[in-house]
Amino acid sequence: MEYQEIIKNLKPELEKATVDFREELMKIRASRLSPALIEDLKVECFGSVCPLKQLGAISASSVKEVMVQLWDKSYVEGVMRALEQGDWGFGVRADDNKIYLTAPALTEDTRKNLIKVLNQKKEETLQVARRLRDKFWNQLQDGFRLGTVREDDKFKGRDKLDELIKEWREKIEQLAENKETEIIG
């Protein structure tokens, strides 16, 4: 196995980690209230549990308000119960088959807490990168031990691996920095 092939196999895994991190960032409320914040909320309806996004359309009706238009009026009770259990800190009201979530203004303490959550998500994502780096470095070393990777290629591969991880890490840091700026306002 060539070191280029090992590096090529790493790229999709880093891309998946980037997508996962972006999804986590969308769930962190900043100055705007995002539908992504509640779309995966688990709701119990008729004895089964479904994500909220399968029960209706979720849209931002304003900067501080999200509206959930449920497909069926019978879902309202289950959705309201799930939202109340979530400790979101939102004002919640129901109107027929529509549910409105209103967000209070962010205080300094909530901003600090959001930044802590952001940093925690960033660190979890960076840990994924460290595990991937170790995994692919071990593949290079195994290839060298088995004689399928030359010694020069092993070190070239390590350098490429480090370069790729460094570029990816900078991308994650930039995404986190942008979100922090958004939270601070």
Image (cartoon, grey):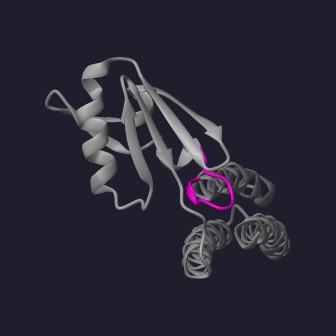
Q: Residue at x 69, y 60 (%)?
A: 31
Corner quadrant of residue 105: bottom right
Q: Position of residue 185 (x, y in %)?
A: 77, 69
Residues in magenta?
A: 27-34
Q: Position of residue 114 (x, y in %)?
A: 58, 72
Q: Position of residue 66 (x, y in %)?
A: 55, 41
Q: Is residue 45 above or below residue 180?
A: above
Look at the image and say whether residue 174 sits in the magenta stretch: no
Left or right: 132 in relation to 167: left
Q: Main secondary structure of the magenta part?
A: loop
Left or right: 16 in relation to 95: right
Say which quadrant the N terminus sits in.
bottom right
Q: Residue at x 45, y 32 (%)?
A: 53
Q: Is residue 13 above or below residue 70?
A: below
Q: How many marks?
A: 0
Q: Is residue 145 visible?
A: no
Q: Is residue 149 visible?
A: yes
Q: 166 or 120: nearer the eye?
A: 120
Which residue of the protein is positioned furthest toward the left in this rendering? Answer: 47
Q: Residue at x 73, y 65 (%)?
A: 179
Corner quadrant of residue 145: bottom right
Q: Position of residue 144 (x, y in %)?
A: 68, 71
Q: 174 or 166: nearer the eye?
A: 174
Look at the image and say whether residue 28 sits in the magenta stretch: yes
Left or right: 97 in relation to 48: right
Corner quadrant of residue 130: bottom right
Q: 112 or 176: nearer the eye?
A: 112
Q: Is residue 176 above or below residue 102?
A: below
Q: 94 or 156: nearer the eye?
A: 94
Q: Residue at x 39, y 18 (%)?
A: 71
